[in-house]
Amino acid sequence: MKIQDNCSLLEHNTFGIAAQARHLVEYDSVEELQDFIRQRNIDGDNSPLLHIGGGSNLLFLKDFDGTVLHSRILDLHVVEDNEETVCIRVGAGMVWDEWVDYAVRQDWFGLENLSLIPGEVGASAVQNIGAYGAEAKDFIQFVDAVDLQSGDVRQFSNAECQYAYRHSIFKTVLRGRYAVTHVHFRLSHKFQPNLGYGALRQALARNNVKEEQLDATLLRRVIIDLRNGKLPDPKVLGNAGSFFTNPIVQRPVYEQIAAQYPDVPHYEVDANYVKIPAGWLIEQCGWKGKALGKAGVYEKQALVLVNLGGATGSDIECLCHTIQADVQKQFGIDITPEVNFI
Ligand code: EPU
């Protein structure tokens, strides 16, 4: 276990915000986390706790006057292997894309479309990360977690996690209550590419890749190139990926917009609801490539807010509120941050 006092969080948030934590505790095993919680209970310590992963979905508005917890649990075990599928239990502290890379190299298939998503394995199960028509929930079988109040271990089934678009029980009723320690993924021994997403099919066609030539390594490569072409590298330009979730609106709201903008991109949700890309709405409001002080809107993808250098959390928040107000004024739609404000 590594404990640091008055610690800079600069290396722990991809927005590159210079916030500090009173304490930063990084633990290497379930037992170390349980020891930390038991000691805290003995000491009667009620100071705030914040569990972070790779810090790729956080916006610090001020210093954190409490303990920031970070998992460095990195073990990986095959729990069950049969002819069709394999189930692997992966430590929450593993970097997500290192896990995807490892799985593809083992010929464990399914995660290819989720290549290069920033963050760590634990957060993937909280956030239900997704890209190019796939979501983490499609592969998660169980989530092992520790109760941050009692230190007890609990296992959640996929159904108990209550997954939905960028949502889980860990973001709603159990917010802040559990630390995910391991995630069990069920992957396939058979490569079945998920090519439902239009932009992915177009990228394959541009690269002259025929479906019969496609293997998991090549699909992963195409996804990585697609992401690199659209999303800024946090090491170069601070950002937290998509800043907003894509709003799900009632069909008449979509139809009213489509009457004015016949090419509005959209995804069908069900008979009553349609999802509209927030990036498109923001671009229509004229924000793409624009800035407010040191906070900017990325020039290639308006859904991504960027730190142009030395921005504070409040600078980004101010840009967020201005964009939300403009989208509301022009389209009558509320867009909600995907990023957590701390
Ligand atoms: N669009 C615009 N202008 C923009 C951005 C997008 O018109 O500035 C349009 C695009 O032309 C396209 C549509 O909006 O027709 C969708 O764009 P894109 O495929 O880039 O995806 P997105 O809906 O903006 C979502 C996820 C991303 C994920 C991509 C690809 C959310 C909040 N975001 O973005 O996830 O990589 O799909 O699947 O659902 C993340 O969560 O951090 C993230 C990057």
Image (tube, rainbow, N blue to C red):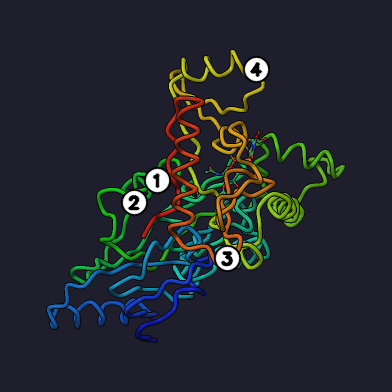
Q: Secondary structure at mark 3?
A: helix
Q: CA distance from mark 2 to mark 1?
A: 6 Å
Nearest to viewer (mark 2 / mark 4):
4
How far across and down, in percent of the image, does residue 264 sit? 62, 24
Residue at the image position 28 percent from the left and 67 percent from the top: 146
Are the residues at dot 1 and dot 4 in contact (C-beta closer than 8 Å)? no
Which is closer to the viewer, label 3 or label 1? 1
Pointer 2 or 4: first along the chain = 2
Dot in front, 4 or 3: 4
Query: What amino acid does circle 2 point to?
Result: Lys
Is residue 237 visible from the viewing direction of this image?
Answer: yes
* First of labels 4, 3 by sequence position: 3
Task: Label 4: state its secondary structure.
Answer: loop
Q: Which residue is mark 2?
A: 171
User: Which mark lies nearer to you, 1 or 4?
Assistant: 4
Crowd rating for badge 3 (residues with CA inside 10 Å; few <14, some 14–19, many 20+):
some
Q: Which residue is mark 4?
A: 262
**Do the residues bearing badges 2 and 1 touch, measured as CB atoms within 8 Å?**
yes
The circle drawn on residue 167 is 1
The answer as to whether callout 3 falls within 8 Å of ligand 1 is no
Mark 1: amino acid: His
Q: Are marks 3 and 1 in contact (CB under 8 Å)?
A: no
Residue beneath label 3, please?
Answer: 99
